[in-house]
Amino acid sequence: MNNQAMPMVSTSSHTKVQYLQRQAASFLLYQSVLQDEVGVAFLDLLQAIRYIDADARGCLQAYGSYFYALAARNQNWEDYIITQILFCENPFTILAQQQKFEDLPTALVAAVQHDLQVLQSLYECSSAFLSEWVQTVAHMPISPVVWYDESEKLKKQTKFSAYLQELDNWGDAVEKLAAYYRQYGSGLFAQYRAFRWQGGQFIGIQYPDPIKLSTLVGYESQRDTLLKNTEFLLSGEAALHVLLYGSRGSGKSSLVKSLLHEYSDRSLCLLEVAKSDLKDLPEIVEHLRGVSQKFIIFVDDLSFEEDDDAFKALKVVLEGNLTARPQNVVVYATTNRRHLIREFFVDRPAPKDNDEIHAWDTMQEKLSFSDRFGLTLTFEPANQKTYLNIVHHLAAQAEINITQEDLEFQALQWATRHNGRSGRTARQFIDFLKADLTLIHEANSNTSKTEN
């Protein structure tokens, strides 16, 4: 509670609340701004306090819901409005990514100007004002606690937020806002950089794998080729679909996932699609057409069974059809199999085979499916030299301080007893060794303290 005198009933405040309700009802494009928990709680609170003789209990409950919603997001009301604007998806945000500002329909621009002015009014309705009004209508001696978080949550949004705060009329920010959508996208794609396709929809991944390119060593030629192809994608050139083929644990998947961090400032997104969802691939690609970001569709551990619908869907995306391929999407797939479609000896046609006239053609289509990827990067099993190079690289990054001889001896013992020589084995060994050395150091420190 804030220790302050109870304000006098203000007709102007009462009128202000009703004005805000009319404003909130007049959105033309940005209705979704107030459709989540915070927005609904805000509207419910306005409804509860709109009359001077409002029910005090109802006002307090409505304010509690509003406070709780902001606290749950750990976000101030003002920051909430800004982020909702930047992450909103509507006809303007979508079209702004595809067309120059001067080519946008005049009516659409006018609608955004109107909505931005409404949003400015809502932005200026601070939590402190609402708290004071609840104090008034509930006849409380002090006002309810005001939610406010002083830590800075907005990162790339802070610049745009500062720009809006300098404007007397937010309606003047339409062109700048269109440029923002063109650079960062809108909706879910503006909030996340990593996604998975699940249940027929995009799901944002809040905590993507933190692996970075600098932690990977070995297979430099394959890495450089993949980076160059990714540069093509980011620059708007025709990038190739890539198949990363090789032994397990060689770092194929890690290399693809590290691209997300390597190009985090260049609007690159990674979309994980499971083998079971590959049948949706043509639909996924159409969803991504026209979006401002560049997308790598990541398919891990790729292989197919006989007459698999996923095989046909991926073939359409790789080879194309009458629909033009979007320039902002490529497929990066990993596999341990050189021939992606499982083949059995019984499948091989014999001269007396009467079931299919061109059976050899069918078999060759299966065997050559990997050729439909523009690039195939091969990851051979790590020899002892490569394996130890990886171990030394990871040990240096982990700041492990033991002799080179001891490190190599333990690393080779680990590979023999576990999964063989590979980048994955090296990572597991270093993680285990670092944790073990840390516990030994802590135990020795505690022993020394006890003896002293």
Image: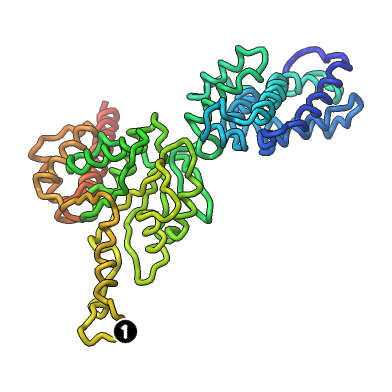
The residue lying at 39 percent from left, 29 percent from top is 265
Image coords of residue 169 (percent x, y): 67, 15
Q: Nearer the viewer, residue 192 or 440?
A: 192
Q: Residue furthest right?
A: 53
Quadrant assignment for the C terminus = top left
| Image vertical order of residue 124 relative to residue 430, above or below | above
| Image vertical order of residue 310 relative to residue 406, above or below | below
Where on the picture, by quarter, is residue 175? top right
Mark 1 sits on what residue? Answer: 355
User: Mark 1: which secondary structure?
Assistant: loop
The residue lying at 39 percent from left, 48 percent from top is 297
State left or right for residue 169 relative to residue 189. right
Kind of residue sitting beneath label 1: Asp
The residue lying at 34 percent from left, 65 percent from top is 304
**Residue 145 in view:** no
| Image vertical order of residue 394 relative to residue 277, above or below | above
Quadrant assignment for the N terminus = top right
Q: Nearer the viewer, residue 180 or 73?
A: 180
Where on the picture, by quarter, is residue 63? top right
State left or right for residue 302 relative to residue 85. left
